[in-house]
Image (cartoon, helix red, strand yellow):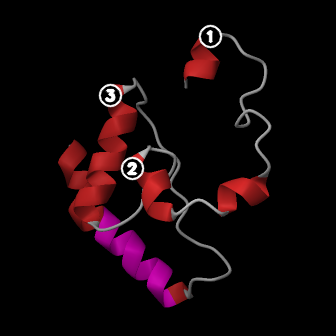
Amino acid sequence: FARYTSGAQDLGGGNVPRKQLAQLPAALLAERGVIIAGDPSHCIDGARKHEAAGVDQLMIVMQSDQISHDDVMKSINLFGQAVIPAFL
């Protein structure tokens, strides 16, 4: 976000290779606001970090080739029931 507001041209993570980013623990990425992950309270906290920075819309991606369809649907349902109401 700081690179965007400063007018920097490279908004893709400072040319940090994806391989390096993949080696960082998910908990660290969530703590720093890079990803929103965890139980509903952690997801609310993560979304609040973005809200505090002025973000008013998030694109949530829950599916991947490593998560079953049933688990994705459970996550979407839980997000709708426990996270979204915190912002209404």
Q: CA distance from mark 3 to mark 1?
A: 18 Å
Q: Say above or below: 83 vs 10.
A: below
Q: Residue at x 36, y 66 (%)?
A: 38
The x, y position of residue 84, in whole percent, is: 28, 53
Nearer the N terminus, badge 1 or badge 2?
1
Q: Which mark is residue 26?
A: none
Q: Nearer the viewer, residue 30 or 39?
A: 30
Task: Check whether the beta carbons of the residues at disc 1 and disc 2 lie within 8 A of each other.
Answer: no
Q: Which mark is residue 52?
A: 3
Q: Which mark is residue 31?
A: 2
The x, y position of residue 85, in whole percent, is: 20, 53
Quadrant where the C terminus sits is top left
Farthest residue, direction top: 6
Q: Nearer the viewer, residue 18 or 69?
A: 18
Magenta stretch, residue numbers? 70-79
Find disc 1 in the rendering and name its residue: 6
Q: Amino acid at mark 1?
A: Ser
Judged from the image, the secondary structure of the residue bearing numbered disc 3 is: helix
Nearer the N terminus, badge 3 or badge 2?
2
Residue 74 belongs to the span the image colors magenta: yes
Q: Amino acid at mark 3?
A: Ala
Judged from the image, the secondary structure of the residue bearing numbered disc 1 is: loop
Q: Residue at x 43, y 61 (%)?
A: 27
Tell me the crowding category of disc 2: few under 14, some 14 to 19, or many 20 or more residues within 10 angstroms, Cα based.
Answer: some
Task: Check whether the beta carbons of the residues at disc 3 and disc 1 lie within 8 A of each other.
Answer: no
